Amino acid sequence: MHTPGSADYEQAGVTCLDILQQAERRGLDIIAFTDHNTVNGYRQMMREIADLELLERLKRIQPDELGRLLEYRRLLKKILVLPGFEFTSTFGFHILGIFPPEKPLRDIEYLLYEMHVPGDVLDKGLTEAGATSDVLTAYRLIDEAGGLAIAAHANSSSGVLMRGVNIGGQTRIAFTQDTHLAAVELTDLNKGRRSMAYWLSGTKAEYPRRMHLIQGSDAHRLTVSATDARRLGVGDRTSEVLLPERTFAALRALFLGQDFHRVRQSRAPLNLSVDPAQDIRAQEASATLAFHPSLPRRSVNRFEEIVRDAAAMANSDGGVILIGCEAGLNKKPKGVPSADETARKLADVLREQVKPALQPAIVVQTIDDAHIIRVTVSGADQAPYAVKDSQFYVRDGAETRSATRDEIVAITKRSVEAAAQAAQAGQAHRQRDRGASQRGQPPAQTHAPAPRLDHGQRPDQRPPHPQQTGQQRQRDHSPQQSGGQRQHPPQQQPQAQPAPQQQQRAQPQSQPRPDRRREQSPQSHPRPQQPVDRAQADTKEQATAPVAAPLEANAPANGAHEMEAPASASAAQSAPAAASAPLTAPPPIEGMPRSGVQIAAVEEREGIRYYTVRDLRNNSLVRNVTIKSARDLWHYAIVAYNTNAYNIDAIPWKDSVAGQQRAVLSRAFRAGKMRYDLALKSSDGTACIFYGVAEDGMDAAWKQLIAEDQAPAPQPSVAGETPEGNTASQ
């Protein structure tokens, strides 16, 4: 197909992004930009993407620009776009040259120069090119350059089989039988024996070589002309190829081989009603997805809820906000009046009210004749983000709530550590470049960060934490990596151990100050303790800090532990120092769900129990949670924990993969979903209980176990008076 890079393109205002979106609607998997005697169309697309990525790296990209960049990334993951040209050879015959995406455009341009295409023709994408190379030379040069040489619309005007041109019978035969020719494009494959395909099927003595026959749209416009049906649009005439993978190498191997049954004309062109938000609307509201069916009519604080949702998503792993529609493909969107103007106002409000300034991708799209606004928020590295009234927000399931102190600290530390890791990587790059320049070698190419995708999805993982000192390792209580990735152990980190006098300076400035209440002698549950490496501890007090671990199989029941005071005077003296070091919660284990919560640790100070809650959605740990401050699922989990709802010894375990044992404890419909309490015992006997797990956070083993366990399970009795005097009900 052609692009506006060709001088004879018929529709004004069409962009390369428009062409990709139309190709998606037509269900195309592979397309080739083949402008007349130039690669300007493909270069224009790649240059636009590079400019947008530069603005993204410089943090100067506007919401509409970010929307275009994300749309490019989405479509280029779905459609393979090949660079090429339509070369005008001697006698005016047109020949396609198609190349792999990694082929440098300069090399393709040099090939056109080698075939004597004038510079002004190459710059403007003109059809007439003057005295250029002959057909057979063009075949050979394209093939030797690693491309596919295809005779363009061979049976029509400017084709090598065009009637009415006296070039000699043997020459005409050579134009379709040359060994450097990969395929022949015809426009009459649907005419049976009347088609030129009959002459190229290998049954004619004059044409002994059987050719791969394809058809293409040769589109000079986005859609078919309303006045001339012969002026085709993108995808109006296509071919089907059976490939093991969607790559240029597989396509080239097919055309250079003899598997002719793997190539055929498409029976009917597709015209899909592609809804970019269709996959999103099919989902339910969640931590990374929010729906706002309509906006309030009042002008003051009209975007208040959207601003809070966007700030909360930016403080975690990002997400998508749809304005003007609700979840469900069968529900007609209400739309947003004056959607373009509303989107611009929303972008200004987000920049003004969220600090640091937040610039998500904002796109206006049409669904069922209704204009909706799609806001894509990336998990940003400048977190935490605060709304104008100095409020910090996080997502709690499908709701947005105010962040706790420990959540703010954890978000800040994660951002600081990511920035430090990026700075170290940049310094290592510069050192390698300096070393290479001293040796006379070219510097290594510095790649941009991995792109963030639509729907809040992030293919790049957060960098591992830098190596920490023993003191920092005891004090650090930041959340785990996004997506439940484990932190690398300190011995695997390449960074050198800081000197003792630098350890205090190496600690992040965002660490919370010690809680004054911890000056009292704490009491904690006698949990099985993890081994502590005293060689890595800075002081004896740190080595004796209480360490919480998962429930062991021989533990009586979660929460059913008596309080124990320090066993000796020396222990009592060291208790304040031990209390200042936070509890180390158990690490994640294989098979842990990705929704719900786990009570990871508990300690008591001044008669009040403080819980460490693991949020299984992002594997983050939140400390100092009390039953009075907990709400919804967290409150339910703490009450079930305190009332010993499940006896570890009485759980009916079932064998699972890798020596694990699993069990479904109960199920109930809460917060719009069926939720389950689950138990998991690892091969070493460590047992954990997870509360309020939804099916979208389970792996295949959990789902299979739930399908097998259809009998009604006893519900935990969590109603009644809690130790702090609060009444809670399931």
Image: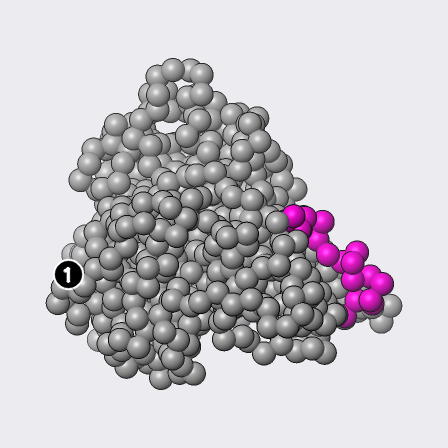
Residue occupying the point 75% across, 64% down = 428
Side (left or right) of 609 relative to 476: left
Q: Position of residue 159 (x, y in %)?
A: 36, 54
The image position of residue 619, as x and y in percent, is 47, 59
Give the percent coordinates (x, y) of residue 2. 42, 45
Give the crowd class for mark 1: few <14, some 14-19, many >=20 residues within 10 Å.
few
Residue 503 magenta-drawn?
yes
Observer able to see residue 181: no
Q: What residue does disc 1 label? A: 192
Q: Is residue 704 left or right of residue 147?
A: left
- Considering every residue shown, the one lying at the far front of the view is 569
Mark 1: amino acid: Gly
Residue 431 appears in the picture as rendered: yes
Label the magenta part by its dominant secondary structure: loop
**Residue 182 in magenta stretch:** no
Residue drawn at (73%, 56%) of the image: 507
> Where does the magenta region start and end?
497-516
Is residue 299 toward the left or the right of residue 636 in the image?
Answer: right
